[in-house]
Amino acid sequence: MESTNVDVLFSPVSLGAISLKNRIVMAPLTRSRASSLGVPAEIAAEYYAQRAGAGLIITEATQISFEGMGYPRTPGIHTSEQLDGWRPIVEAVHQHGSKIVSQLWHVGRIAAAINRGKSADVVAPSALQAPGQMYTDARGMIEHDVPRGLEEADFARIVGDYAKAARNAIDVGFDGVELHSANGYLLHQFLSSNVNRRSDAYGGSVENRVRMPLEVLDALVAEIGANRVGLRISPGHTFNGIEESDMEALYTHYLKEIDQRGLAYLHVMRPFANTMESDVIALAKSVYSGKVIAAGGYDGESAAMEVQSGRADAVAFGQLYIANPDLAERFRKGARLNKANPDTFYTPGTAGYTDYPAITS
Ligand SMILES: Cc1cc2nc3c(=O)[nH]c(=O)nc-3n(C[C@H](O)[C@H](O)[C@H](O)COP(=O)(O)O)c2cc1C
């Protein structure tokens, strides 16, 4: 029954300067197959090319500097070796007719410095350790490092790192970048009411807490043009110890500001698949007038409903794209879907990475 319904996902759409063959998006997915110096693995070209049935691929979160790296074996886009690693990936995806943007990442306090191939301070809006633990190759599960609170003198450097990363992305052939302002990492830490305890112009009121994310966004827009810049948010997502005591006021203000920038798209991740207390897609649509990618717990049918009803222009799939390299084709044919194996989400090598089967006919 659902096969007629999903047809709506197969119409082309333009997100700013990026034209998509369909409305199916591969969500950003950290897979930890890069080197400790953040150089993407060679097999990443095959992994992404296998998934190029998507209209748009958003890369795994990709750090803008060693300071922005927190987990083991995540890729960067700030050294020449890393850029050389990305070129064949971008080329392979383009050859298969898809578009690809680089998700630009700074983890802030969600870090263990021993995961980095090169040392750098762990930093955050305030010197508050994140709750919980993180995996390290060297010592297994350990507490997050206690971050150094950022000084105003740091800001220009970090904004500059983001802009340089965006320039690098365009130079290696990416179609654009997605600024990661979600899931409890640096920019979300600035937005939050509990992690950001600053008493200067970057903390306190909603207007102050959005200041750093907007400065970064404006730097990206100045560097590569608004029509190649997307932004990801996850309102209400408490991952990594985030609280937003004034979530609606915060995102209403943030999105009004973002709306004026004329970005390629806004990417909204729902906090808890299908069990949201508030409808964050509706919140975003009430303020934001540009193109929207929705993510979080969608299947083909629910995605088609979001597009059909005009709530989203495209829909991103995470776990389904890990397990189904040919997800778009499977949607089109109403084929059965493989299930993702969490045991191999972040393990090195091809198992659970490039070996999920495609349908044969
Ligand atoms: C293994 C894994 C890695 C992820 N890595 C990222 C990431 O690098 N950046 C990001 O913004 N979200 C990341 N996410 C969140 C996904 O992009 C997506 O929003 C989430 O999985 C919900 O969508 P789904 O229900 O379709 O999987 C990750 C999720 C998983 C399961």
Image: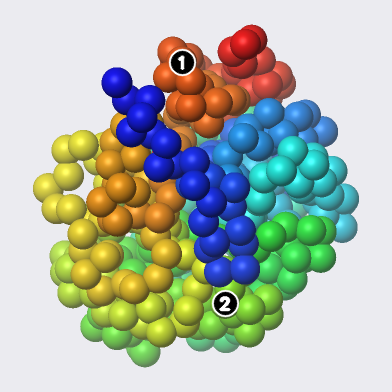
x and y percent of residue 316 in the render?
45, 43
**Which residue, given by chain and number where applicable, does mark 2 sit on?**
226
Residue type at mark 1: give it: Ala
Relative to 247, 118 lies left or right: right
Q: Is residue 210 visible?
A: no
- Number of the label disc, if any, that sits on residue 305: none
**Picture disc at residue 335:** 1
> Which residue is most to the bottom?
201
Mark 2: amino acid: Ala
- Front residue of 112/353: it is 353
Image quarter of residue 4: top left
Residue 361 versus residue 201: which sits nearer the camera?
361
Query: Which residue reaches farthest left?
Result: 277
Residue at 81% across / 59% down in the picture? 172
Residue under the point 70% across and 66% down: 165
In this rendering, position of residue 297 left or right of residue 343 = left
- For marks 1 and 2, give the CA distance: 38 Å
- Could you say which is closer to the camera, residue 24 or residue 346? 24
Element class at badge 1: loop
Sequence order check, earlier mark of 1 and 2: 2
Residue 3 on image: x %, y %: 38, 25
